[in-house]
Image: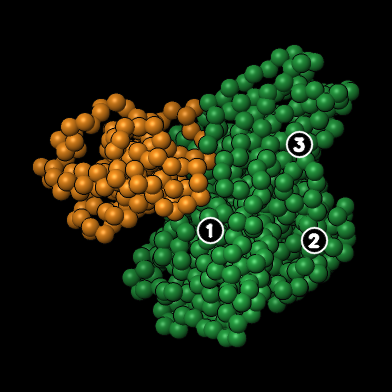
């Protein structure tokens, strides 16, 4: 199987402690320069991410989680095209995929990588020790998954098929 | 998803939480008289303003990066404004040609993408479907489903602007391209060619956007004439020759008839001309022109103010569009709040033209990136951000640490105008109506959105700011409550 082109999009606010887990993961992966993998980071998802997503076969949205399992969870995403769930002020990963499909005809597959954080309420650019541990696990997992063939389930036995919007 | 709760008077209560499609959140209260007519409406900001205190004690050279934490929406404007202020602190305010043109390119990219996002994705649902249309489709995906080409253009214009920011600032969010006294990179030929490849398409879409905004305004002129329209003063930067100026220039203020109040005021003299008032019901300040006093000295900033205030625009297509726009005022400035959209698209066209000029300028590949001179203890920078005039003012101690930080952001300057627009629209759509509907309340939001407010900036808060809309009767009782799921 030919490995697809992959976009890893880490998002969150590095100024709010563990909310910066997504960009931290992106920083780590960017240094690895994995062939066929583009890495981007941002504070929050926006409409133009749909155009970027449409250029790839797979997008992995990496974000911090407040209540999910540690060290991380990874789940497939379904594109969201329910207008009742949209605002123009903020966009979720399923909405990005929905716009990519509606406007650019893309059938990009999406995955949500939720890395468990512990500290979110302070103004600090340091990750907590728990978050750093969880980040390491996510980086090791993703490096292995990106180096192997898709689908991602084969790389992570605890992958849930539950749709996560 | 909307969640509406209401009961009958006198205990009926309506709240909207939050108002969507503004950048950040606040609160609107609408006060009725004994005849249930709208007496007054107020836009409140409910979070504490603290960034200026938070930044004290930090090294001044951190400011161009640190102040971007004010806001995830328009960090480039804060980045450049802080850089302009700190240029003075290092004695490097006379930039090299490469540094100034790189900063201008970054700024045009920022305004281009910000205006495109606002028009195509924040405002267009109201303009295309109507203020009181089905709220379930009055959003970005609703536009995508029914007007896919427009939605696609908006996204790609936004993306193009972000690519300019990434190429000039180092990254599209919270870059570090501008530093005190200059920049830290030039534009490579590879970056230039990639941006030039898409430029003609961006220029054409900008022309189309002007036509769309113009058509909307002229087609709906009768309705818009009393929709948040009122006389005001205007404030903006202008170039020495009176041209529209977004990056650097002198302050010009005009009155409601277009007469000059002051002109070509140097950035460092701003405190002699502008003061800030406070009111007990909001943390957001109320700037005003000192010579006119707080009651008469309030003014509008942003695209409408800039197009009204300048003598001309130094790019041919945008200037032709400006001349057509000014006919709306019949010899006076244009005072329609909803004309902000048309003015905003004229600026998009101007930015597209300037981006083309700059990309073909060899100075962008120059090697002289920074200058330094004799250091100072104070620096003031003023820039025209997408939403209007932005002021950054710093003082530093002998250890180069910030001891004073004063920011006047554009949404703060538009505070009084937004309050007037909210009051006017509330009176227009709610007076005499037996029931307050979602559509009426969205009309109030439409008036706020015309100003493209960034409320997170305006309060300098770091956190979530829900916007609540409440309606009160003459006895001060809350008449209703609405709750909207939002950001």
What residue is shown at x 65% (from left), y 29% (from top)?
A: B16
How crowded pointer 2 is (Cα within 10 Å; few <14, some 14-19, many 20+) is rated as: some
Task: Provide the residue designation for mark 2.
Answer: B275
Q: Which colour scheme is used?
A: by chain
What residue is shown at x 65% (from left), y 67% (from top)?
A: B403
What residue is shown at x 69% (from left), y 31% (from top)?
A: B469
Q: Is residue B398 above or below residue B117?
A: below
What residue is shown at x 25% (from left), y 28% (from top)?
A: A160
Task: Say left or right for A145 vs B248.
Answer: left
The secondary element bearing badge 3 is classed as: helix
Task: Say left or right for A74 vs B436.
Answer: left
Determine which of the numbered discs, if any, sits on residue B68 in the image. 1
Which lettered chain is shown in green?
B
Task: Provide the residue designation for mark 3.
Answer: B425
Q: Earlier in the sequence, mark 3 or mark 1?
A: 1
Residue B207, position as x, y percentages in the image: 54, 56
Residue B129, position as x, y percentages in the image: 58, 33
Q: How far apart are marks 2 and 1 (CA)?
A: 24 Å
Kindly indicate the quadrant of the structure image that contains residue B38.
top right
């Amino acid at each position: 199987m030919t490995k697809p082109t992959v976009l890893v999009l880490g998002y969150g606010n590095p100024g709010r402690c563990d909310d910066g887990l997504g960009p931290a993961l992106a920083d780590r992966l960017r240094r690895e320069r994995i062939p066929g993998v583009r890495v981007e980071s941002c504070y929050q998802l926006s409409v133009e991410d749909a155009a970027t997503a449409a250029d790839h076969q797979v997008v992995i949205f990496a974000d911090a989680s407040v209540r999910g399992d540690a060290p991380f969870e990874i789940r497939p995403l379904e594109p969201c095209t329910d207008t009742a769930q949209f605002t123009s002020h903020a966009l979720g990963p399923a909405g990005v995929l929905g716009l990519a499909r509606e406007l650019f005809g893309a059938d990009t597959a999406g995955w949500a990588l939720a890395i468990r954080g512990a500290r979110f309420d302070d103004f600090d650019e340091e990750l907590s020790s728990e978050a750093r541990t969880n980040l390491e696990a996510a980086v090791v997992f993703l490096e292995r998954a990106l180096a192997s063939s898709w689908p991602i389930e084969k790389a992570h036995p605890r992958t849930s098929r539950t749709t996560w919007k | 998803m909307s969640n509406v709760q209401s009961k009958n008077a006198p205990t009926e209560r309506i709240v909207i939480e939050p108002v969507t499609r503004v950048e950040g959140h606040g609160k609107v209260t609408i006060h009725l008289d004994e005849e249930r007519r709208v007496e007054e409406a107020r836009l409140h900001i409910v979070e504490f303003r603290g960034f200026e205190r938070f930044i004290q004690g930090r090294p001044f050279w951190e400011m161009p990066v640190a102040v971007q934490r004010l806001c995830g929406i328009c960090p480039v404007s804060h980045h450049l404004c802080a850089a302009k202020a700190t240029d003075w602190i290092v004695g490097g305010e006379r930039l090299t040609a490469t540094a100034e043109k790189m900063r201008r390119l970054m700024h045009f990219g920022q305004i281009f993408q910000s205006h495109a996002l606002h028009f195509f994705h924040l405002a267009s649902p109201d303009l295309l479907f109507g203020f009181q249309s089905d709220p379930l489709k009055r959003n970005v995906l609703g536009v995508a489903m029914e007007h896919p080409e427009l939605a696609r253009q908006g996204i790609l214009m936004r993306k193009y602007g972000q690519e300019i920011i990434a190429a000039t600032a180092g990254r599209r969010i919270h870059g570090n391209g501008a530093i005190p006294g200059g920049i830290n990179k030039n534009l490579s030929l590879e970056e230039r060619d990639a941006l030039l490849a898409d430029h003609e398409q961006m220029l054409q879409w900008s022309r189309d956007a002007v036509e769309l905004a113009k058509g909307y305004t002229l087609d709906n002129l009768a309705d818009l004439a009393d929709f948040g329209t009122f006389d005001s003063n205007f404030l903006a930067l202008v170039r020495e020759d009176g041209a529209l100026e977004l990056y650097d220039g002198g302050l010009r203020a005009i009155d409601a008839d277009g007469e000059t109040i002051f002109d070509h005021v140097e950035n460092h003299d701003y405190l002699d001309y502008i003061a800030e008032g406070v009111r007990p019901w909001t943390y957001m300040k109320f700037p005003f022109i000192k010579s006119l006093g707080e009651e008469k000295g309030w003014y509008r900033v942003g695209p409408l103010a800039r197009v009204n205030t300048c003598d001309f625009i130094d790019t041919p297509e945008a200037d032709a569009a400006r001349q057509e726009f000014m006919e709306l005022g019949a010899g006076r400035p244009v005072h329609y709040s909803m004309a902000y959209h048309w003015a905003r698209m004229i600026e998009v066209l101007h930015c597209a033209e300037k981006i083309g000029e700059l990309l073909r300028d060899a100075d962008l590949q120059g090697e002289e990136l920074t200058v330094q001179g004799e250091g100072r203890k104070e620096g003031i920078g003023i820039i025209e951000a997408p939403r209007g005039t932005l002021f950054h003012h710093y003082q530093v101690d002998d250890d180069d640490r910030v001891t004073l930080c004063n920011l006047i952001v554009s949404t703060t300057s538009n505070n009084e105008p937004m309050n007037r627009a909210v009051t006017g629209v509330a009176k227009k759509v709610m007076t005499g109506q037996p029931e307050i509907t979602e559509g009426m309340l969205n009309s109030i939001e439409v008036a706020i959105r015309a100003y493209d407010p960034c409320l997170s900036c305006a309060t300098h808060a770091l956190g979530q700011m829900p916007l609540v809309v409440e309606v009160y009767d003459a006895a001060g009782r809350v008449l209703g409550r609405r709750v909207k799921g939002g950001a």
